[in-house]
Amino acid sequence: MEKKLKIMVIGAHPDDCDLHAGGVAVKYARLGHEVLFLSMTNGSAGHQEMGGAKLAMTRYGEAQAVARTAGIRYKMFDFDDAHLEPTLEARKMLVSEIRQFAPDIIITNRPNDYHPDHRATGQLVMDASYMVMVPNFCKLTPPLRYNPIILYAEDRFQFPAPFKPEIAVDVSDVLDVKFAMLNCHVSQMYDWLRWIGHDLDEVPADEEARFEWLCEHYRPIYEGGARKNEAVVAARYGEERAKQAKAVEVFQVSEYGGRLPADQIDTYFPF
Amino acid sequence: MEKKLKIMVIGAHPDDCDLHAGGVAVKYARLGHEVLFLSMTNGSAGHQEMGGAKLAMTRYGEAQAVARTAGIRYKMFDFDDAHLEPTLEARKMLVSEIRQFAPDIIITNRPNDYHPDHRATGQLVMDASYMVMVPNFCKLTPPLRYNPIILYAEDRFQFPAPFKPEIAVDVSDVLDVKFAMLNCHVSQMYDWLRWIGHDLDEVPADEEARFEWLCEHYRPIYEGGARKNEAVVAARYGEERAKQAKAVEVFQVSEYGGRLPADQIDTYFPF
Amino acid sequence: MEKKLKIMVIGAHPDDCDLHAGGVAVKYARLGHEVLFLSMTNGSAGHQEMGGAKLAMTRYGEAQAVARTAGIRYKMFDFDDAHLEPTLEARKMLVSEIRQFAPDIIITNRPNDYHPDHRATGQLVMDASYMVMVPNFCKLTPPLRYNPIILYAEDRFQFPAPFKPEIAVDVSDVLDVKFAMLNCHVSQMYDWLRWIGHDLDEVPADEEARFEWLCEHYRPIYEGGARKNEAVVAARYGEERAKQAKAVEVFQVSEYGGRLPADQIDTYFPF
Amino acid sequence: MEKKLKIMVIGAHPDDCDLHAGGVAVKYARLGHEVLFLSMTNGSAGHQEMGGAKLAMTRYGEAQAVARTAGIRYKMFDFDDAHLEPTLEARKMLVSEIRQFAPDIIITNRPNDYHPDHRATGQLVMDASYMVMVPNFCKLTPPLRYNPIILYAEDRFQFPAPFKPEIAVDVSDVLDVKFAMLNCHVSQMYDWLRWIGHDLDEVPADEEARFEWLCEHYRPIYEGGARKNEAVVAARYGEERAKQAKAVEVFQVSEYGGRLPADQIDTYFPF
Amino acid sequence: MEKKLKIMVIGAHPDDCDLHAGGVAVKYARLGHEVLFLSMTNGSAGHQEMGGAKLAMTRYGEAQAVARTAGIRYKMFDFDDAHLEPTLEARKMLVSEIRQFAPDIIITNRPNDYHPDHRATGQLVMDASYMVMVPNFCKLTPPLRYNPIILYAEDRFQFPAPFKPEIAVDVSDVLDVKFAMLNCHVSQMYDWLRWIGHDLDEVPADEEARFEWLCEHYRPIYEGGARKNEAVVAARYGEERAKQAKAVEVFQVSEYGGRLPADQIDTYFPF
Amino acid sequence: MEKKLKIMVIGAHPDDCDLHAGGVAVKYARLGHEVLFLSMTNGSAGHQEMGGAKLAMTRYGEAQAVARTAGIRYKMFDFDDAHLEPTLEARKMLVSEIRQFAPDIIITNRPNDYHPDHRATGQLVMDASYMVMVPNFCKLTPPLRYNPIILYAEDRFQFPAPFKPEIAVDVSDVLDVKFAMLNCHVSQMYDWLRWIGHDLDEVPADEEARFEWLCEHYRPIYEGGARKNEAVVAARYGEERAKQAKAVEVFQVSEYGGRLPADQIDTYFPF
């Protein structure tokens, strides 16, 4: 490793960072780079039965389990789930956090995702960009002297413009770890996402069995994603590997972050 | 009728629902389906002379006349006209209303229409989508177990992306009723829209004459719309009928609502 | 009963109305008057273990049990517990609710109680007063032509000015019903208030036993209140009865509501 | 006149300045001092029939008629009537206005008056005090180098503390002008205040007759006020004049404004 | 000059108007048309050392120097730099300002520029459009009877849609004045933009030398812009001039403003 | 020392904590108790020349110098000076901070002090009280199981009720340290407070001389305070010492905090 990179993944809820960039996070971490996951909300709403502090604390525990599994750090802001708004106050908290971590790369979702908290998150990262360099904003935290590169994780939305895959990372080799990370989000993977997806009764009660279920559930989804993104994967890894990839994570470079010169992609994505 | 459908049309002002989907509303109603129009604001601003409670109450009366004419229900939120903002409070009121009506389909405008209230309305529907399924949001109203289909009514805006007509309904056969509905909005059709459009002095004083004037005013507009949308009309009704249609209402399926499978279009649009 | 009175009790959380005016509520109801309890929040926060929709729904159920017990109606706004603010939106919702019920008397807490939600509630009632008569505010709900009498329930705060007991009602004869009402608030009386008060382990598991415990817990508190307010009780009921009262509810007339002429106290408090 | 004084009267609605300090305003103006009335709202709500821009413009016209009658200036902020909130934005607008006028004395109402707009007005003046001297607040308007004296006009509220009459001005000699000022507020004196006070049918249709009615209506009210404040009037004018005064305006010195030394009262109130 | 035009340029910070439309502003002014620059914020944040009122006042002075240089007027709202939000309050201030100036054309940036204040500015102009014609909004300022043409200045953003150059103005002949205007923004051109761009140490200390440096810095940027926009420049001026242009300003017609018929482009851009 | 106390002093600006409770802070610290000063704002506004980040950073440095001088910790929230509002967001930040420090005693100002930031601070502490014990508020920070004692520092306001001195501490013996603490606030004691107080030209340029000036300036003020509070000082220390005290700090027990039993005053104020 020539330079130690700092990667900040910003999601709306505990589990969004993992879904967006769990694979690259593990790859960065294994190479000794520093990865910080930040959940903008405390996850206190997304559950069919639980709610409030108990749910938030459960999610916090699950996030820390992920951190241990992936070798990263996982922070959570205490904004209430389902109530995130792109206010100046939230913007300032985010700017301050970004300045203190000083990431080379920020990974987040586009401002047009399916959940209002996701849209607010994408908006807040956009609104924090550039401002991280302005000393008179968030006056007690010294500014960055650069605008971090901002990457958007993949989404399926076509309007106002489709996601444009620009950088692909083959995460087939760490897919098992990504599954293990998702497995930590018990209250989401085995409760909430199942309930909202109407397949709660498919989940086995046994811990091992349900983990297997989870892997079987997501494997074809990731495989489908790999097939769909073969072109951009091939551009980095060659066609052969693109065809064999079991899972990929693809990103679009946001116009609101710093520039990512084409000849430095391998520096920032050293895998 | 195999299944009774519930259709919710959400507009910013009293008359927007009618303009967006007055024709299909009548067609649904005639087949025994349930239609609810919801105006997000009380219409208290859009007038050159009146204002305040008197105007709001006038608009409420006009909306009820529409309801009787079309065989539907017409609700109005009491947000002040020209002051609608996509706040959490408004989002919660809308989520609660949607849950209580439990619509199969929601029709609204895109978040990029010409009036800030329209944009706020489109945004609020987007922000209410998915959240209608989250029990910990709007805690006292039980959630829906599905995300309603959301349709955007046609608009002329090209940025950030043009309206994409995907579903067309030939409303030629109910155009007279749609005109009768518009005719109920006396303070808009014969006052405000004329004043803002600089043709107030063209409106006849006599009630019958002014209704005729209204029909003559809108007929070529609707006819133009029908011609412009011939391709999408033909896809459902054949080229012959497309050419002869006097008025159509076309819709784009929003990515934020539930999926509308191609083979179920005739189920949801049984005419 | 000469005139049917309408009494609206407005509290911050489910159980506040009961604590403020449970006794008079029963007395009014027994005489055929109409009583509406309104909780400004959904009670979704005040619990040591539960939270979110589940807690709110539990509280809703408890409130309805109270309603059945006391022969009154119990409404709940869906503002999240611990997050009530005296905004224009909340003010409008309250004004609209007051207008629709058209109460002769509103009972609430002073704007200087111990919980921020209570202070917001007192403020909101103050801010709704007078405005209930202004047609151009909350335009779609016709205004009242009078300002309801507003009474403050007793509190222990000395600043900025002490509570001033002006009207007393002897509720000794309905104390058993008031206890039965409190008994409905299971998640508050036997959970939250015990946990926050550090006497959770005193509560018997058995339902009957715990009810007895509750009565024993509150009886001396009410008796103490009766003794403290003997002077104002005596003014209405004579010294003899004042000395024997087991429980009283005392009120201060707010300057922000309609006038309560001294010679009409017996009309408004016909017991 | 030794020094030209600048007096700023700040009310919530057009007519509040007049009611608070119409008499002293005339007296100051006649001596060549400069008086500015500022209505925080546009008066667009307080009417039983009108509303919106038409009402606001009517009120603006009435305010200008007052200005001509009294020899003062009358400004109006365009905050919507019934919607004033003590926000930072409103505070900044007020600070900027105060700095530009640079008053020696500000007269307003206490923050605990009967209408939420009045309370917001009193709060805003309090929040603007001191800040008028801080250059980094409202950065483009140079600060005052002193804190203006702030006086509260009389009100009847007893909580949290009663109004404390400290300075009295005998306005008997300009009562006719004060009546003429009130007479300009046609839509308030003969419409709204009558409707809300249930004496609309007492108002004569004829302009002269209704003015006479108005004088007869207020004369005993002012006379009652003079009697009630005899002590503080006597302190300035002697007992004889106090007893004969037909109308007085009394003020309390706010703790939030600059100091008013006892030996300078005659300088600031040179009549 | 057949008709005197009124041109309003609306930017987020002092210097944005100049950068967007400094060239056309000079051309309009020289022909006797009226140009108003409006900075939405007071510029109090964008500096590496200064801040607060001192910076705002410095920027105000610099803006006035620009005004004298270009023969235009330069106004500044006192919203704090880095804190602009598209609130109803800001919208109303802008609507009122637009109404009072009554521009034929408004030039601003798109709502998707790099700084949150820029995005808020673009949003506010969008939200003010149409509303400038609604009398019941901003009730004390009479409405316009037309929707001004709104033009977007060029930006480099591709999402959600790229800037679409529709109207080009060759400003080569006034480039020296545009440079002189930029030269007035001392604290931006020689301080802040250099510091944020990491070329602060390139700036000569001498005033004349630094001005030369500034010209040399921007000349190739403008030349590059001219080359990039040759097609749209040629459409108005012919290919020859397009190739020789040293600087151009290109605009996109916003869908939210009034229509600009193709045959009136020369009327509105008489150069 | 039997029990280690934790004392949290909460002020609006850097220097308010010192002025309120600098003396007791030193006394607590010397006895080994833990003292945390928290400034709610970053102090970025209160200066006649500086502003923004530079001023905030200057104030931060001055606060840390105080911390070293007094043997305490000094934290600062990054809310902008002159812009503090009692929002839910600020309340949550404060609740979280209080929970993490878990103070026995909180010292702050009453909600009716002279600066809007001071009023907001007093309000925020009031709004944080009780809520520090509610787990479902600020969900990620475990609640306290008790309500800290809240003390108000002395102020001169008489409305709505005068400050009521209940506990006095003789700080004569640490007055020199308190002066040394104030001396750290260079930009306040020698710049801002002098400028706003019109005695800037009295301040000597020399550091030692100006410190002497400061001591001479405040000594009679503190002596006056000691004389004014002799009764309450005597109650704790006897009349003799009360008469000789050179400086005292007196406090009122807030009704919103935990109870302070009379027999435990010496435990909580062990000096």
Image: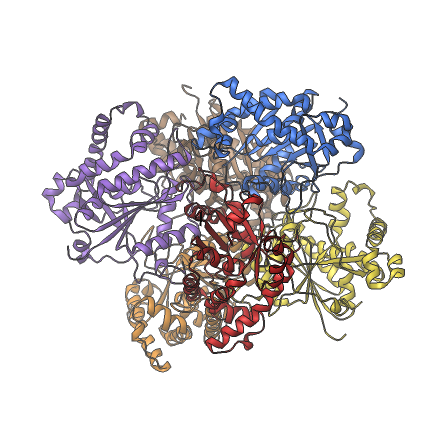
Chain colours: A yellow, B blue, C brown, D purple, E red, F orange
Foreground residue, A23 or C21? A23
Q: Position of residue C56 (x, y in %)?
A: 61, 40
Mark yes or no: residue C83 visible: no
Q: Position of residue F66 (x, y in %)?
A: 45, 73
Q: For the point 32% across and 29% down, which residue is it?
A: D191
Left or right of A166, for residue E226: left
Q: For the point 61% across and 36% down, which residue is it?
A: B96
From the viewer's perspective, is residue D249 above or below residue F238?
above
The residue lying furthest to the left in this view is: D240
Q: Position of residue C200 (x, y in %)?
A: 60, 47
Image quarter of residue C6? top left
Left or right of F253, for residue C182: right
Mark yes or no: residue E261 visible: yes
Foreground residue, E33 or B101? E33
From the viewer's perspective, is residue E18 above or below residue C46?
below
Left or right of F2, for residue B5: right
Image quarter of residue B140? top right
From the viewer's perspective, is residue E94 above or below residue B106?
below
Q: Position of residue A188 (x, y in %)?
A: 74, 49
Foreground residue, E219 or F154? E219
Foreground residue, B173 or A45? B173
Counting every numbered tag in the picture gives 0
Image quarter of residue A168? bottom right
